[in-house]
Image (cartoon, helix red, strand yellow):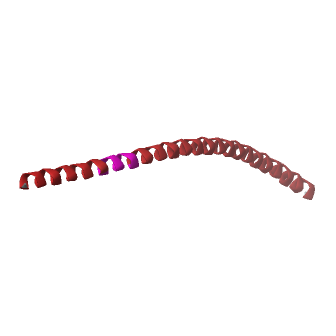
Amino acid sequence: MIYDELAISYYDLIAKNAELTQRIEEQVKEIAQLHDERFDNLAHISELNDELSKLNSQLEHMKEQVGMMTTDSTRSKQMFKHSKEH
């Protein structure tokens, strides 16, 4: 009877091993997919960072232009005001 119990236990362990092996194989595939997604996401983040840098540079340039136009406008108003006074 002990032999029969050992045999049953052995076959149960083989079945569990097969199930665990299958789960591990599925997890390996999922990890590979996640790795690929991570690579794609990092590439996309890099592209977005490049675009952000470009847009920030353009914004700074536009701020400089607006600042110069504001300064020019203020000077023009002061000159006009000064010329009216004389």
Closer to us: 75 or 15: 75
Image side of residue 70 versus residue 22, left or right = left
Q: Residue at x 21, y 52 (%)?
A: 75
Image side of residue 14 versus residue 63, left or right = right
The percent position of residue 63, horizontal first and vertical second, equals 34, 50
Q: Residue furthest bottom?
A: 2
Closer to us: 63 or 50: 63
The percent position of residue 14, horizontal first and vertical second, equals 83, 48
Q: Residue furthest front?
A: 86
Start and end of the magenta stretch? 60-67
Magenta highlight: main SS: helix
Write down the quadrant of residue 55 in the picture.
top left
Asked whether residue 61 is drawn in magenta, I would say yes
Image side of residue 50 versus residue 35, left or right = left
The percent position of residue 35, horizontal first and vertical second, equals 66, 45
The N terminus lies in which quarter of the figure?
bottom right
Write down the quadrant of residue 2 in the picture.
bottom right
Asked whether residue 63 is drawn in magenta, I would say yes
Closer to us: 60 or 78: 78
The C terminus lies in which quarter of the figure?
bottom left
The percent position of residue 27, horizontal first and vertical second, equals 69, 47
Q: Residue furthest right?
A: 3
